[in-house]
């Protein structure tokens, strides 16, 4: 079964425009590194994805798998949360009676495109548009107030670069955080019609670096100004 074609066409059309890469023509942008040791992450106005279908879509890059679990999306409680699995670097999500862990390492230095999709009673993980894992799911709600942190517990902060965060509920785009900023202010811009702007915590201009896309390499890659940092694009 293909996510882009068969995973209920009405949802995929309204949810993600057939899940094509909407930034495929993007040439240059800022990428910001979160830092667990320094508490560099983001907070956002609370959003609760209820028992209907939802999608968390984001891009993520980290140089190596963490020694412990790391949270990328979480609310004020110990669960639900979605993030990185300890040692394997795979994507994982937990809410209510549902726990799903992927098998693809997304902390291998490449930039990966990840979808956490709940659809018609099944929770899916897709990495770079390829199915990774799935499980029958409970209908529990998923509240998000933090990106890169698990506020209720220490030691779950993330260290990677996260960008192009889109949160859909019932096929409607609810939040759109591009994280393409040089932090002249600490506001994390929401480009959805809801304008639910967040806040960058302890992040300053020096944490953001401008990259340009080189489309003449295979795979394409992000390069900083002096090409001292290269990030292959896996999707």
Image (cartoon, helix red, strand yellow):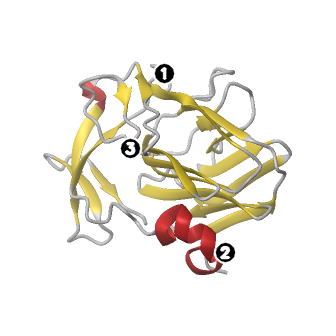
Please state if 27 lies on the left or on the right of 204 as rendered.
left
Query: Alpha carbon of mark 3 to alpha carbon of mark 1: how far?
Result: 29 Å
Instruction: Label 3: state its secondary structure.
Output: loop
Q: For the view shown, which residue lies furthest in the left direction? A: 226
Q: Position of residue 118 (x, y in %)?
A: 70, 58
* Relative to 109, residue 77 above or below: above
- Nearer to me, 161 or 151: 151
Residue 68 in view here: no
- In the picture, the disc for residue 210 is none
Q: Is disc 3 in contact with disc 1, using a CB cutoff of under 8 Å?
A: no
Residue 2 in view here: yes
> Mark 2 or mark 1: which comes first in sequence?
2
> Mark 2 or mark 3: which comes first in sequence?
2
Rendered residue at 53%/57% (across/down): 114
Q: Position of residue 33 (x, y in %)?
A: 38, 35
Q: Find residue 232 and report its image quarter.
A: bottom left
* Relative to 178, residue 213 above or below: below
Say which of marks 2 and 1 sits in front: 2
Residue that mark 1 sits on? 37
Query: Alpha carbon of mark 2 to alpha carbon of mark 3: how far?
Result: 26 Å
Q: Position of residue 218 (x, y in %)?
A: 30, 72
Rendered residue at 23%/25% (across/down): 184
Q: For the view shown, which residue lies furthest in the front direction? A: 193
- In the picture, the disc for residue 8 is 2
Rendered residue at 30%/29% (across/down): 207
> Mark 3 or mark 1: which comes first in sequence?
1
Please state if 228 lies on the left or on the right of 11 as rendered.
left
Instruction: Label 2: state its secondary structure.
Output: loop
Residue that mark 3 sits on? 191
């Amino acid at each position: 079964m293909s996510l882009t074609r068969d995973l209920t066409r009405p949802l995929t059309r309204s949810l993600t425009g057939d899940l094509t890469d909407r930034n495929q023509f993007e040439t240059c942008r800022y990428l910001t590194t979160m830092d667990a040791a320094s508490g560099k992450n983001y907070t956002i106005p609370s959003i609760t994805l209820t028992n209907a279908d939802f999608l968390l879509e984001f891009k993520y890059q980290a140089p190596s798998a963490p020694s412990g679990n790391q949270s990328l999306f979480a609310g004020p409680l110990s669960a639900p949360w979605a993030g990185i699995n300890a040692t394997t670097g795979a994507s994982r999500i937990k809410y209510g009676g549902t726990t799903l862990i992927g098998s693809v390492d997304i902390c291998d230095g490449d930039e990966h495109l990840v979808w956490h999709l709940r659809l018609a009673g099944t929770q899916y993980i897709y990495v770079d548009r390829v199915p990774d894992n799935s499980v029958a799911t409970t209908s529990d709600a998923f509240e998000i107030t933090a990106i890169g942190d698990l506020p209720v517990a220490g030691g779950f902060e993330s260290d990677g670069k996260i960008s192009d965060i889109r949160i859909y509920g019932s096929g409607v785009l609810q939040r759109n955080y591009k994280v393409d900023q040089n932090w002249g202010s600490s506001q994390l811009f929401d480009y959805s019609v809801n304008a639910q702007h967040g806040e960058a915590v302890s992040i300053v201009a020096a944490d953001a670096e401008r990259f340009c896309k080189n489309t003449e390499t295979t795979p394409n890659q992000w390069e900083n100004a002096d090409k001292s940092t290269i990030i292959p694009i896996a999707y």
